[in-house]
Image (spheres, rainbow, N blue to C red):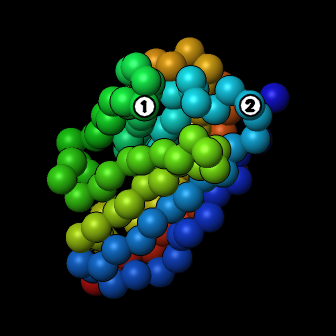
Amino acid sequence: QVQLVESGGGLVQAGGSLRLSCAASGRTFRSYAMGWFRQAPGKEREFVAGTRWRSGNIYYGDYADSVKGRFTISRDNAKNTVYLQMNNLKPEDTAVYYCAADPSNGVTTTLSWTYWGQGNQVTVSS
């Protein structure tokens, strides 16, 4: 069983930055795919970014088109933590952000990830 605990959300003005963190329990974090999703009010949960192991210490990063060039996903395996650095935030980025993990090392934009965090609110004011 893997538990995911998110932190780092909050209120920021448009153009500002936030960094979300997701701390994972478990010993096999290194080989897990990790991802971020978000859900805005009245909308479906959507994929934001994901990272999957390639080889050694190299990981692929995948991004939704809406966040490419603004958001960066990274991970610190020593801390069992994945991050989402969000720059140049826009009001349309306002949502509850969820961390996800899957032992398959496959990043998918669907909701078929095995483990989910509790969600963390990010609000961007105009």
Query: Residue placed at 39% from the left, 48% from the top?
Result: 73
Q: Is residue 50 above or below residue 93?
A: above
Q: Which residue is mark 1?
A: 57
Type of residue at label 2? Arg
Describe residue 114's horizontal placement relative to residue 60 as left or right: right
Is residue 124 depicted above or below 69 in this figure? below
Q: Which residue is mark 2?
A: 27
**Res. 32 visible in picture:** yes
Q: Which quadrant: the N terminus?
A: top right
The secondary structure type at the circle numbered 1 is loop
The mark found on residue 120 in the picture is none
Give the foreground label among 2 and 1. Answer: 1
Please rate how many residues cluster around mark 2, counting C-alpha atoms within 10 Å: few if below 14, some from 14 to 19, many from 20.
few
Snapshot quadrant of residue 25 = top right
Towards the viewer: 90 or 62: 62
Q: Nearer the viewer, residue 40 or 38?
A: 38
**x then y, percent, for residue 17:** 34, 74
Q: Amino acid at mark 1?
A: Asn
Q: Residue furthest front?
A: 56
Disc 2 element: loop
102 and 47: which one is in front? 102
Can I make out residue 99 in this image? Answer: no
CA separation, marks 2 and 1? 16 Å
Residue depicted at x 56% and y 69%: 8
Q: Residue furthest right?
A: 1
Q: To which quarter of the image does residue 60 belong?
A: top left
The first of marks 2 and 1 along the sequence is: 2
Measuring from the top left, give residue 75's x and y in whole percent. 48, 45
Residue sitting at 42 percent across and 31 percent down? Answer: 57
Badge 1: few (under 14), some or many (20 or more) residues near its Cα, within 10 Å?
few
Q: Is residue 26 left or right of residue 102?
A: right
Residue 100, x across and y down, in percent: 58, 38
